[in-house]
Amino acid sequence: MGIILSKYVMPGNRVDLREIQRVKEEDTVKRKTYQSQVIDILLDDRMEIAMPMDKSKLILLPVDAEYDLYFYTPNGLYQCYARVVDRYKNNNIYILLLDLTSNLRKYQRREYYRFSCALEMNSRQLEEEEINAVEKHTNLFVPGLPLQRSVIVDISGGGLRFVANYSYEVDSLILCKYHLWIDNESKEYSLVGKVLSSKPLENRPGIYEHRVQYLNMDADNREEIIKYIFDEERKTLKNKKGN
């Protein structure tokens, strides 16, 4: 199979399983996503993962069901499709046995659609203890530290671009805090971002443009952001048709 599974995915890596739903191209369906962890790589097309849980309750994913898998590794995000072939218990761990049904591939976050916008955001550079938490694939934010204002100019499920009258160093980790209007209510997001670029704008002296990639993002937050983008796009198209 394309990329050798055992070379890039290791026991302990986080894996998200996303439902596969066959729908018409014009339809939009919110697909459920389950979080789990890789237990063992048995073959280059077979693996064991922990059975997902929701509030201490096991989620019994059906045998023969196929899922869209996303592996979070130190070398980036990898994606493939896989089918559940068995469920069992081993050493008090409930396990799903999966067979890959596609090649493993490096997932390029630029594949997320970027939505142009103008949203207020507050940010700051992460403290050392917060960076250590990120490296352990958890998020920890020290409360009460001062934030700087900026404006998001485009947003996607994989990251965002914002402008500000200050700059961050490339590869630095920052806290991004902003609000989105989700299901008729304002929701605050506190997300970790890695600065991919920071450059001055030629036509606006003293203003810097930053590109940021999300790290350790919760699957539900990602789905909500994508839903927000779809909803805003729908509103834009409706307004254009109305005019």
Image (cartoon, rainbow, N blue to C red):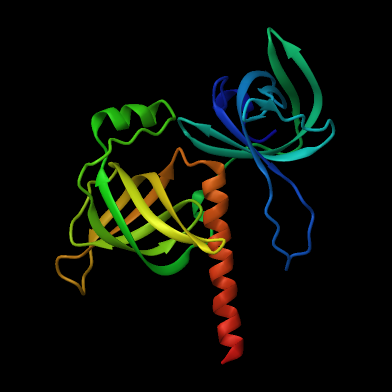
Task: Give the left or right position of residue 7, taking residue 49 as reference.
Answer: left
Task: Give the left or right position of residue 55, taking residue 99 as reference.
Answer: left
Residue furthest right as drawn? 64
Q: How many marks?
A: 0
Residue 39 location (% of width, % of height)? 63, 19
| Residue at point 24%, 30% (across, down) | 128
Quarter of the image with the N terminus in it: top right
Task: Give the left or right position of residue 218, taking residue 168 as reference.
Answer: right
Residue 130 location (% of width, % of height)? 31, 32
| Quarter of the figure with residue 164 | bottom left
Task: Give the left or right position of residue 118, taking residue 218 as reference.
Answer: left
Choose between 102 and 188: the one closer to the eye. 188
| Residue at point 41%, 25% (across, down) | 136
The answer to whether one can see residue 103 in this image is: yes
Residue furthest left as drawn? 206
Residue furthest top as drawn? 91
| Quarter of the figure with residue 64 | top right
